Image: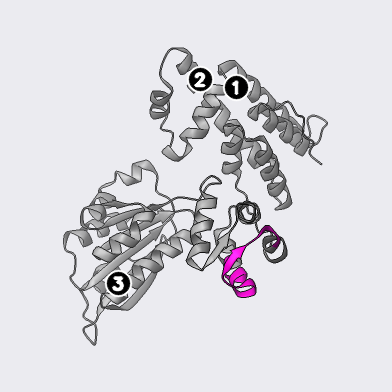
Amino acid sequence: MKLALPQLTEHLQREILPVYFISGDEPFQKDQALNQIRTAAVDAGFTERQVYHVDRNFDWTQLQQQASSMSLFAEKKIIELRMRSNKPGDGAKALVTYCEAIPDDTVLIIVSPKLEPAQQKAKWFNAITQVGAGLAVWPIDRRELPQWATRRMQQRGLQPDAQALSLFCDRIEGNLLAADQEIEKLLLLSGAGEVSAEDIVELVTDSARYDVFNLVDTALLGDVEHSVKMMHGLKDEGQEVVLISWALAREIRQLISMARVVEEGKRLQAVCEQYRVWPKRRAAVLAALQRGNSGFWADRLQDCAQLDRVIKGQKMGNRWHELLQLLLQIAENPAGLKAG
């Protein structure tokens, strides 16, 4: 079976499956899911625990040996595999073999980076989801962040007003670990109850962490103000313009191809399926295709080429200023906000 993160609590109240596969690139939520499964397993009597860090030199025979070995005190056990890669390599066969003969006294929890669509169709992953559960952990985007923050605060007895919640989300965006720590600090310093914007200003550290690919999607959505804020955040964090430029150019090339197919009469949703746009990204891509035709995006690709020449020193200019102008063009805002 496949589980979504919001389903996990209710699922664990009903049953504990013999195998769980947690995948994703958002560390805080992955760790929360792992702890939740581990705690439920311990409560169910699986008290012994073995942890293995899987790299390319990992000996996969250890999995079967550990699963078949008897504990000195005949205790049920939890085996955790922390995979550095989303490709098990030689471990694919070992995982299939394990799932074909599941031990009664063991819960296997595997944690990996985000899986690609092809990996989710692989024999080893299908073997896991037939006897256990696959849990994909997605990053919390800006639209979902207020709901996530409200839920985390309310769990601790905090009641933020709308202004406090908005300010809190601005300060911790993209950094859920810092967000959770700041919520604990709020509770410690101000106590349970109502939380005002003044409380956030006084007590919450600005811990926003921005991501290049989230910046791309924010610009595609047409959110100019937030795109500019994210660009400045990446600049302050020491991000190189060349990576942002590469990500934008790659996306724009695909948008040109997709826009041409739309102009031939194909429905937008069908084009997204043809180009395998992930469901989480479809709103951004659809917004971009609705705002600009193939000619518009071809012009933006020329803007990318100009930015690239500035980055390489082949053309005079300020790379961050050129990037800002490109973002404004992508989001179609004539306001001319300055880089500062």
Q: Earlier in the sequence, mark 3 or mark 1?
A: 3
Instruction: Look at the magenta stretch and give its main secondary structure.
Output: helix
Q: Amino acid at mark 3?
A: Ala
Q: Earlier in the sequence, mark 2 or mark 3?
A: 3
Q: Secondary structure at mark 3?
A: helix
Callout in the foreground (3, 1): 3
Q: Quadrant of residue 199?
A: bottom right
Residue 95 shown left or right of residue 174 in the figure = left
The residue singled out by tag 2 in the image is 259
Q: Position of residue 119 (x, y in %)?
A: 34, 46
Viewer-proximal residue among 277 and 55: 277
Marks 2,1: beta carbons within 8 A: yes
The residue singled out by tag 1 in the image is 297
Report the span colored magenta. Answer: 183-198
Instruction: Please give the name of the residue rendered at 64% of the width and 30% of the height, measured from the top-left corner.
Output: 331
Q: Secondary structure at mark 2?
A: helix
Total numbered circles: 3
Instruction: Please give the name of the residue rendered at 46% of the width and 17% of the height, measured from the top-left corner.
Output: 262
Number of the label disc, if any, that sits on residue 41: 3
Q: Is residue 193 magenta?
A: yes
Viewer-proximal residue among 18 and 125: 18
Viewer-proximal residue among 297 and 268: 268
Q: Secondary structure at mark 1?
A: helix
Q: Amino acid at mark 1?
A: Trp
